[in-house]
Amino acid sequence: MMSSSQAAPRRHTRQREAIVRVIQASRGPLAVNDILERAQREHDGLGIATVYRTLKLLLEDGTVRQVILPSGETRYEMSGLGHHHHFQCRRCGEVVDLDVCPVAVLTGTTLAGGYTVEGHELTLYGVCPSCQE
């Protein structure tokens, strides 16, 4: 018998695995509707409530993390990707991960006025190659 302080292990359902695969395969953080649409290709009956429940569990166990864009929109990506930033296309809305950090401010740097930098997040905006065509 489990003590009240021990949680039952979570089952790895096919739907949860499909959602994780969708997020892992993405080139950038995804909105809930994008996750739903892509995961439904594998599981036709998958619903939005299941996606939200699964994201809550994946956030709790540290598998995924939230990315809150400057617009306030919440997207999801895998945890453990390391320091990176994002680019968002102003036309189609796609958000992709950037491999470079264009900010040369290191953690621990003290800015004018005595502000100490603990980290930074950056989203660049523009037009993606597909929308430029």
Image (cartoon, helix red, strand yellow):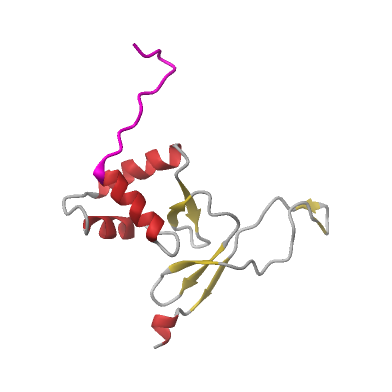
In x, y percent, where is residue 54?
33, 42
In x, y percent, where is residue 114?
83, 52
Q: How many marks?
A: 0
* Residue projecting furthest to the left: 45
Q: Left or right: 123 with respect to 45?
A: right
Using the rendered view, name the quadrant where residue 128 is placed: bottom left
| Front-most of residues 61 and 25 | 25
Against 24, is 50 above or below?
Answer: above
Against 45, is 130 above or below?
Answer: below
* Residue drawn at 43 percent across, 65 percent down: 27
| Front-most of residues 33 and 8 | 8
* Residue drawn at 31 percent across, 58 percent down: 33
User: In the image, is residue 70 part of the stretch drawn in magenta?
Assistant: no
Against 105, is 126 above or below?
Answer: below
In x, y percent, where is residue 24?
40, 55
Against 88, is 115 above or below?
Answer: above
Report the magenta stretch's main SS.
loop
Q: Left or right: 91 with respect to 80?
A: left
* Residue drawn at 58 percent across, 54 percent down: 82
Which portion, as a residue range, is magenta?
1-14
| Front-most of residues 50 and 43 | 43
User: In the image, is residue 7 part of the stretch drawn in magenta?
Assistant: yes
Give the quadrant of the C terminus.
bottom left
In x, y percent, where is residue 104?
73, 66
Give the quadrant of the N terminus.
top left
* Residue drawn at 59 percent across, 63 percent down: 122
